[in-house]
Image (cartoon, rainbow, N blue to C red):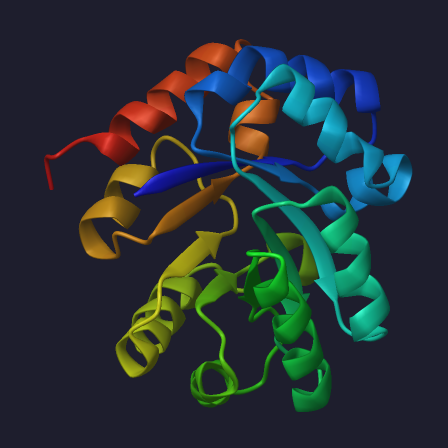
Amino acid sequence: MKIQLALDLLDRDQALDVVRKAGPHVDIIEVGTSLLKLCGIQIAADIRAICPGKPLFLDMKIIDGPEREATLMSKCSPENYSMLAVASDTAVKKVLAIANENNATVVFDLQSVLNPVQRAKELKALGATQLCVHKNADCGDNLEDAFREFLDVREVTGLPVSLAGGINLNTLPIIKKQLNPAIAIVGGAILNASDCREAAIAFQKIAHSTEV
């Protein structure tokens, strides 16, 4: 299991400070949607300057303008970026085609999909290779539903599935034991920690432990 640090912040300097301290101790660094809107794609280069070689995930949440948005991603070359699973099949195919040309992985965020299992099957048929089950308490989601949805989606697709939504040091061992997602996405539990470096190390230790 990998740890993805979500920089869900509205301050460029704060975000880069977190990258300096915690970035070396996580597997993937995510530029959150709000930070990306604030800073533009230049933030990708700023992070790479601090943590060269660390995989980047840009939470673009693409839903329309597929060719334009995917082409924008090709200009900053993140290893991964997100598209909303509710996007049209035509948009999905266009984004995947451009991503494949640039050796990028599109992660399909299943948040707000009415039938996530069915949509996950459809996305796989369209060429998707990675999915994300995303539950957000701020949007009224029931976080307990995440476990069931995650297992159902992974079972029907066999694809790597990331899990996002309120993960902390207390819940991560349970998540690892019961779900063992490909990637656990962690934001506030690291960002708001008194020592974000030590928090990142603690998450990484659990994620990479061979104990189940």
Residue 146 seen in the current view: yes
Among the 4 quarters of the image, the one containing residue 207: top left
Residue 179 is left or right of residue 49, and the answer is left
Among the 4 quarters of the image, the one containing residue 21: top right
Residue at figure coordinates x 80%, y 16% from the top left: 13
Question: Residue 22: x, y in percent?
Answer: 52, 17
Give the camera-side residue of 131 and 76: 76
Above or below, comparing residue 208 to residue 78 in the picture: above
Among the 4 quarters of the image, the one containing residue 178: bottom left
Question: Residue 157: x, y in percent?
Answer: 34, 79
Above or below, comparing residue 177 to residue 114 in the picture: above
Residue at figure coordinates x 60%, y 79% from the top left: 113
Residue 35 is left or right of residue 123, and the answer is right
Residue 86 seen in the current view: no
For the N terminus, the quadrant is top left
Question: Residue 59: x, y in percent?
Answer: 68, 51
Residue 53 is left or right of residue 159, and the answer is right
Above or below, comparing residue 35 to residue 139 in the picture: above
Residue at figure coordinates x 49%, y 62% from the top left: 132
Q: Tell how many labels.
A: 0
Give the camera-side residue of 140 and 163: 163
